[in-house]
Image: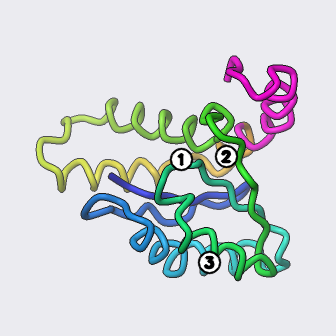
C-alpha cells in the first residue's frame, strides 16, 4: 500500500507503507511528509488538506495533530460516507492505469513499487488541475443528494 500527497501544481512524495496503517503510523506520515510538503508548496498557509474518513485518518492522534497545525494549512472536515468526493481516488485510478500499461509488467513487490513511483513522477504537470477544478461540482452534487451517493 502507498500514501501520497499532491496539490494543484505539484506532486508530493509517494510513500510505501510497510505494514497496516494505524493512527500512530498515519501520524508519523503527517508529521514526516505532509507537513514539509505543505510548508514548501503552500508556505502562505492557504493550502487545504483533504483526506477521507478511513479509521487511521480519523484517529484521535491524527485529528489532534491536524488541529495543532491548523495555522500551517487548512483541513477539510470530510462528510461521512462520501468517498466519491475525494479526488485522490481519481488520481489513484489514473496511477494504477499507468502502471498496468507499463511493459514489462511488474513481477515482484519491488517492481510494482518502482512502477508506481515512476508512473507517479511521470504525471503531466497540469494533470492535477482537472480533478481539483471538479471540486465545486462534486460539492454541489453532494448537497443536492443531501449527503447521499452522487455520480462521482
Q: Secondary structure at mark 2?
A: helix
Magenta stretch: includes residue 144: yes
Q: Quadrant of the C terminus?
A: top right
- Asked whether disc 2 touches disc 1, contact meaning CB atoms under 8 Å apart, the reply is yes
Q: Is residue 130 above or below residue 117?
A: above
Q: Residue at x 19, y 51 (%)?
A: 111
| Secondary structure type for disc 1 | loop
Dot 3: within a 10 Å radius of its alpha carbon, few (fewer than 14), some, or many (20 or more) residues? some
Disc 2 packing (10 Å; few <14; some 14–19; many ≥20) = many
Mark 1 neighbour class, 10 Å CA radius: few under 14, some 14 to 19, many 20 or more:
some
Q: Residue at x 68, y 55 (%)?
A: 50
Image coordinates for residue 62, horizontal then vertical, percent: 56, 70
Rendered location of residue 151, percent (x, y): 69, 17
* Residue underneath mark 3: 65
Residue 121: where, in percent of width, then height?
47, 56
Indicate left or right for 149 with 118 as reference. right
In the image, residue 126 lies at what x, y percent?
69, 47
Question: In this view of the protein, which residue sits in the foreground, 71 or 40?
Answer: 71
Residue at x-position 76% and y-position 62% = 48
Which label sits on residue 123? 1
Tag 2 residue: 128
Q: Nearer the viewer, mark 3 or mark 2?
A: 3
Closer to the camera in the image, 106 or 34:
34
Tell me which segment is drawn in magenta: 131-152
Most distant residue in the front direction: 60
Of all residues shown, which one is farthest toward the left? Answer: 107
Q: Which mark is residue 42?
A: none
- For label 3, the SS is helix
Amino acid at each position: 500500500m502507498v500514501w501520497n500527497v499532491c496539490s494543484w501544481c505539484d506532486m508530493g512524495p509517494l510513500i510505501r507503507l510497510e505494514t497496516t496503517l494505524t493512527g500512530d503510523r498515519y501520524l508519523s506520515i503527517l508529521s514526516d511528509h505532509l507537513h514539509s510538503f505543505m510548508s514548501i508548496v503552500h508556505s502562505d498557509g492557504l493550502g487545504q488538506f483533504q483526506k477521507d474518513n478511513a479509521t487511521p485518518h480519523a484517529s484521535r492522534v491524527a485529528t489532534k495533530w491536524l488541529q495543532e497545525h491548523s495555522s500551517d494549512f487548512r483541513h477539510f472536515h470530510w462528510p461521512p460516507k462520501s468517498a466519491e468526493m475525494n479526488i485522490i481516488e481519481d488520481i489513484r485510478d489514473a496511477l494504477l492505469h499507468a502502471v498496468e500499461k507499463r511493459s514489462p509488467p511488474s513481477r515482484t513487490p519491488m517492481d510494482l513499487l518502482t512502477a508506481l513511483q515512476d508512473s507517479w513522477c511521470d504525471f503531466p504537470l497540469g494533470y492535477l488541475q482537472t480533478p481539483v477544478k471538479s471540486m465545486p461540482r462534486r460539492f454541489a452534487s453532494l448537497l443536492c443528494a443531501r449527503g447521499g451517493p452522487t455520480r462521482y
